[in-house]
Amino acid sequence: MIVYVESNFILELAYLQEESDVCLQILELAIAKKIQLIVPNYCVAEAYHSWVMKSNKRLDLNRKIGEEIRELSRSLPYANSAEGLNGIALLLAESTDSEKQLLDQRISEILAHSTLIAFEPATIATAIASQADFDLSVQDSLVYGSVMTHLQHQSTQQKCFITKNSRDFGSSDIQTQFSQYNCKLLFKFQAGLGFIQRQG
């Protein structure tokens, strides 16, 4: 069975989010070769971009906290309290580094047991068309274009695409497009795992 996932699958695993255990079970099925896991290569870049944005936000917050700590430390009534705030700045720095290490680790594991969908002219053409047809953002259209182009070259076997992005991919028109290629759209990883298990 072919199972398509996108960047939120990577981020669930990397940041140990609420469905990370379920995502790990799906990855383990791929490792055991019980499913074929497919990931658009854009989603790997998108996962790293997400970390960069989060890292930059924390660095900016860390800088602002540092400035406030220095200001407070100049005032005798707050000098001791200001010193205690250094722990927050340290936590922000350490969390950014540890999340990058875990992201690298998870991406390496996923890539070792999945197939990447490369960009092709047809992928971009489908993505551009979907922006107009389904009002998708550029990012979502690249995911849509990648999966849809790959689907068009597969057999009629059962497939599914698991994404948490029900707001953009949940329209009946998009679901109809996927169903034409015997691909079920699912919006929770738990639902995706259940669907995979029911297929045997």
Image (tube, grey):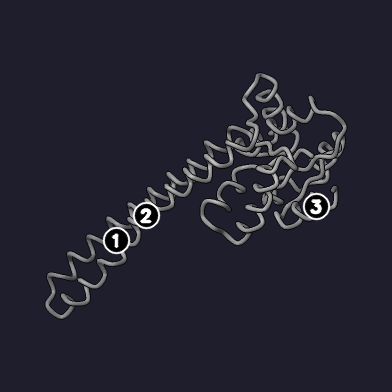
Who's the residue at 62% across and 38% down the image? 113
The residue drawn where x is 65% and y is 29% is 117
- Element type where label 3 sits in the image: helix
Dot 2: what SS?
A: helix
Q: Residue furthest front?
A: 32
Q: Give left or right: position of 195 versus 38.
A: right
Look at label 1 and name its amino acid: Leu
Earlier sequence position, callout 1 versus callout 2: 2
Q: Percent from the top left, x then y, of residue 160?
A: 78, 43
> How many numbered discs, if any?
3
| Mark 2 vs 3, N-terminal side | 2
Residue situated furthest top in the rendering: 121
Quadrant (top left, top right, bottom left, bottom right) of the N terminus: top right
Residue shown at the point (75%, 52%) measured from the top left: 192
Image location of residue 156, percent across then percent down: 87, 32
Mark nearer the viewer, 3 or 1: 3
Give the numbered dot on residue 58: 2
- Horizontally, residue 179 falls left or right of residue 141, namely right
Q: Which residue is mark 1?
A: 90
- The correct choice, above or below, for 129 with respect to 48 in the image is above
- Residue occupied by mark 3: 197
Q: Nearer the viewer, residue 114 or 156?
A: 114
**Residue 82 occupies quadrant:** bottom left
Residue plotted at (33% across, 52% down): 59
Per the model, the C-alpha gap separating discs 3 and 1 is 43 Å
From this view, report whether residue 41 is shown above or below residue 109. Answer: above
Give whichever of 39, 66 is nearer the camera. Answer: 39
User: Which amino acid, mark 2?
Assistant: Arg
State the SS at label 1: helix
